[in-house]
Image: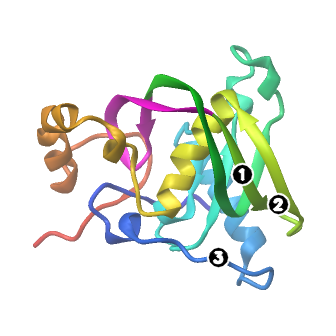
Amino acid sequence: MILPIYTYGQPVLRKEAQDITADYPDLKQLIADMFETLTQADGVGLAAPQIGKDIRLVVIDLDVLKEDMPEYDGFKKVYINPYIIEYDDTETDSQEEGCLSLPAIHEKVTRPKRIRVEYLDSDFQLHDEWVDGFLARCMQHEFDHLDGKMFVDRISPLRKQLIKNKLKALLQGRFRCGYKTKLLPRK
């Protein structure tokens, strides 16, 4: 089932998400719905807060990038209770990011190229690994959602001032995108 994506301003996007256990209700169906929603929205990553759930759950599908990045052929993963354990700040990279919760906003964000993450897979097996490249960027972006952060929190105050009207338009529901969204209720 395709779920609506919560847009900028929704309180759940600013909450710290909670860890879950293997007995979380209908977890397998939720994961399947998140992948279906992600595919329909043409995204590469989706965090549970973006669909209104304040739980530590992320899905990433980089298979769509395989023509330009063959190393991601078949890459489709679930991250349960993920955390970034360590940042390798020796090398950073600045790239344009967008977000399904911030339609039509794209800004350059500087992030470490390499991170150490800890997470559970869909079988609740623990993983502790170093990740680099585009996957590291994607994980940092999505895992930020689990801590109540969005990529616009990582841009300069000047850039944030320059996109202030776009953010205001999002809060007012004045935007277009090709997927189902959940807006703030009108006052």
What is the distance, in whole Å, between disc 1 and disc 3 at their CAs? 15 Å
Name the foreground residue: 151 vs 83.
83
The residue wearing badge 3 is 19
**Quick one: label 3 or label 2, which is nearer the N terminus?**
3
Task: Measure the alpha-carbon separation of dots 3 and 2.
Answer: 13 Å
With respect to residue 33, does 38 lie above or below? Answer: above
**Residue lying farthest to the front in this orientation:** 90
52 displayed left or right of 112: left
Residue 110, magenta (yes or no) = yes
Residue at image point 70% right, 34% down: 62
Location of residue 83 in the rendering, given as x and y in whole percent from the top left corner: 65, 59
Question: Which is nearer the N-term, disc 1 or disc 3?
Answer: 3
Q: Is residue 44 visible?
A: no
Residue 181 included in the magenta stretch of the image: no
Identify the residue under disc 1.
117
Amino acid carrying label 1: it is Val
Range covered by the magenta-colored residues: 97-113
Is disc 1 surrounded by few (<14), some (14 to 19) or many (20+) residues within 10 Å?
A: many
